[in-house]
Image: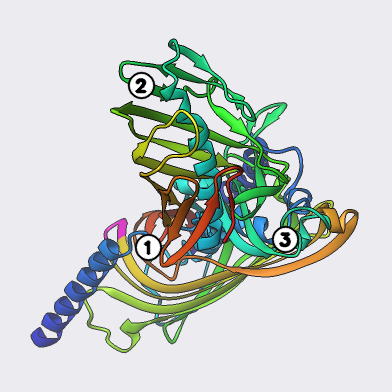
């Protein structure tokens, strides 16, 4: 009888411990409601990077002009952004002062926000490009600022969803690498040429 | 259970049933859409519906598998009967108020010939409030969106639907009747086998059957009551206006333990469970290549929870009152009024 009672208490203790362990272990695993990441392909990100590069090469020359501080606009874009010098600095201020443009052939626009500083002719900064509900973030690293033409060197690091891309400026063109794949960007309109 | 106890308890349980029948539709109408669930869901396709309905599927499944017992003590001899009313609620996280579903799709389904991306594969992003998300002010409803992307840029966009009702919990009420006392077995029937109106959600019919066995029948000297059981349930919702049906099924395989201390019984248990919902409706497809066409949509969503741990207590005041909390993928609460064993 005593052995049975001891067995019973052991069983009870084991069951309660199991319940407690289950209580601790039964925390949320998968969420009940999906929150998927964007399932973009490398080519999707490359195209996004192309349009981003087009925005950047149109913004940077404004810093070389040494204009009076104030709001600046760019032909082919709607919206405006702040420009200052000493040091040369361009930045947007949502929601009233951002750049917006519609890529050729598309019906929907993209918004570009940024904060870029140029010292000794090299631009560095960060920003975002928003298209629909997708947003990509970017970091400008030592991109040369020229008053006309395209940057001769420098990179832009792009993050889109779970993917990353690197834009490298080469003067007349730029390359974008996503993983092991590389495309060339036509900087006159941001499209990919190969 | 004596006739005297019955006479005392009947007005209480009738009042509780009336209260539940009154409050459920009222809850559904507070801060809710003017359309019912079937009318809302007919405005969106399957990809959007999967995200929108996800917390409803999991919440109902978790509720169906909650409150299955209030004690592990099952009479070993003598036929006993009990009646009860159980109320269940699954707690929703902030993450369950919004959803985002992304899929690779054929853009021909969303674009006109000649549009950029027509004929190519693209990305569809459906997002917005879920069925229990924020509704917004009158005249300024918060709606979701569906956007198709080609090369990472939007080429198609359409408005989604608002939440059905803003809520932090998914509720469910279930009357039940149990018979037990033969060879340590207890059979339970739960639900209401006829349809009744629950406001914006639609019309509901809910039936479940369970069988539990007392382990004490094999080991009578155990210092605690132990039982094992199985419960299977189905819950059908039909839209009051549209050809929409939502059929939820749930199963639970559980082990329960309890110990009685005078008027108080403390109980706990673990369970393996599953739940799913079959969803069918007619979609008013407004995409460019299908404008005006109705599309029959039918798919199944599985509930997220596959196990739970329960802790609860029952107070015996002649009529029994119990309350419990279960932990799994979602936290759920259940309580009940029970007359009988």
Looking at the rendered structure, the secondary structure element under dot 2 is: strand
Residue at the extreme left of the image, as rendered? A2
Sequence order check: which comes first, mark 2 or mark 1? 1
Q: Which of the numbered marks, if any, corresponds to residue B107?
A: 3
Q: Which residue is mark 2?
A: A88
Q: Main secondary structure of the magenta part?
A: strand
Q: Tag 3: Cα neighbours inside 10 Å, few (<14), some, or many (≥20)? A: many
Residue at the extreme bottom of the image, as rendered? B218
Q: Please tell me which residue is depicted at 38% across the width and 29% down the height of the picture.
A: A116
Query: Same subunit under labels 2 and 1?
Result: yes
* Relative image position of residue B119 (x, y in whole percent): 75, 65
Residue contact at pointers 3 and 1, CB within 8 angstroms: no
Q: Which residue is mark 1?
A: A29
Subunit ID for the residue under disc 3: B
* Relative image position of residue B275 (x, y in whole percent): 54, 70
Subunit ID for the residue under disc 2: A
In this view of the protein, which residue sits in the foreground, A155 or B130?
A155
The quarter of the image holding the N terminus of chain A is bottom left
Residue B212 is inside the magenta segment: no
Please determine whether, in this image, residue B21 is positioned above or below residue A18: above
Please determine whether, in this image, residue A6 is positioned above or below residue B39: below
In this view of the protein, which residue sits in the foreground, B232 or A3?
B232
Looking at the rendered structure, the secondary structure element under dot 1 is: loop
Q: Please tell me which residue is depicted at 62% across the width and 64% down the height of the picture.
A: B104
Mark pair 2, 1: CA separation: 49 Å
Please determine whether, in this image, residue B70 is positioned above or below residue A75: below
Question: Magenta span covers which residues?
Answer: B260-265
Residue contact at pointers 2 and 3, CB within 8 angstroms: no
Q: Nearer the viewer, mark 2 or mark 3?
A: 2
Q: Nearer the viewer, mark 2 or mark 1?
A: 2
Subunit ID for the residue under disc 1: A
């Amino acid at each position: 009888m005593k052995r049975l009672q001891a067995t019973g208490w052991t069983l009870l203790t084991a069951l309660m411990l199991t319940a407690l362990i289950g209580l601790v272990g039964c925390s949320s695993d998968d969420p009940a409601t999906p929150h998927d990441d964007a399932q973009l392909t490398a080519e999707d990100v490359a195209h996004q990077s192309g349009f981003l590069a087009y925005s950047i090469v149109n913004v940077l020359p404004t810093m070389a002009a040494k204009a009076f501080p104030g709001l600046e606009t760019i032909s082919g874009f709607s919206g405006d952004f702040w420009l200052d010098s000493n040091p040369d600095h361009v930045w947007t201020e949502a929601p009233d002062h951002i750049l917006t443009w519609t890529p050729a052939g598309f019906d929907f626009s993209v918004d570009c926000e940024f904060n870029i500083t140029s010292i000794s002719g090299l631009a560095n900064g960060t920003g975002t490009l928003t298209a629909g509900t997708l947003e990509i973030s970017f970091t400008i690293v030592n991109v040369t600022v020229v008053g006309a033409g395209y940057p001769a060197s420098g990179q832009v690091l792009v993050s889109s969803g779970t993917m990353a891309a690197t834009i490298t400026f080469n003067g007349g063109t730029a390359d974008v690498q996503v993983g092991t794949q590389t495309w060339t960007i036509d900087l006159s309109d941001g499209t990919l040429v190969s | 259970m004596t006739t005297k106890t019955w006479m005392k308890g009947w007005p209480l349980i009738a009042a509780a049933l009336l209260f539940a029948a009154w409050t459920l539709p009222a809850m559904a109408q507070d801060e809710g859409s003017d359309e019912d669930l079937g009318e809302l869901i007919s405005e969106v396709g399957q990809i959007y519906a999967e995200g929108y309905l996800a917390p409803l599927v999991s919440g109902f499944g978790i509720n169906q598998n909650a409150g299955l017992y209030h004690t592990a003590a099952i009479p070993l001899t003598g036929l006993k009967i009990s009646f009860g009313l159980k109320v269940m609620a699954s707690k929703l996280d902030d993450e369950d108020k919004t959803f985002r579903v992304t899929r690779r799709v054929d853009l021909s389904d969303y674009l006109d010939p000649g549009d950029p991306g027509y004929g190519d594969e693209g990305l569809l992003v459906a997002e917005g409030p879920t069925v229990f998300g924020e509704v917004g002010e009158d005249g300024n409803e918060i709606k979701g969106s569906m956007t198709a992307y080609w090369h990472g840029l939007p080429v198609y966009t359409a408005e989604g639907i608002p939440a059905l009702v803003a809520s932090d919990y998914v509720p469910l009420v279930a009357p039940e009747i149990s018979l037990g006392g033969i060879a340590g077995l207890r059979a339970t029937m739960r639900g209401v086998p006829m349809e009744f109106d629950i406001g914006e959600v639609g019309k509901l019919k809910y039936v479940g059957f369970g069988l539990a066995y007392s382990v004490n029948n094999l080991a009578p000297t155990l210092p605690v009551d132990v039982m094992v059981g199985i419960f299977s349930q189905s819950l059908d919702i039909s839209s009051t206006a549209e050809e929409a049906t939502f059929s939820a099924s749930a199963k639970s395989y559980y082990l329960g333990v309890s110990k009685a201390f005078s008027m108080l019984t403390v109980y706990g248990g673990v369970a393996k469970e599953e739940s799913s919902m079959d969803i069918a409706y007619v979609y008013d497809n407004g995409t460019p290549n299908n404008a005006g066409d109705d599309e029959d949509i039918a798919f199944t969503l599985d509930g997220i929870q596959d196990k739970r741990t329960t802790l609860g207590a029952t107070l015996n005041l002649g009529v029994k009152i119990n309350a419990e909390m279960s932990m799994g993928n979602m936290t759920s609460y259940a309580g009940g009024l029970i007359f009988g064993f």
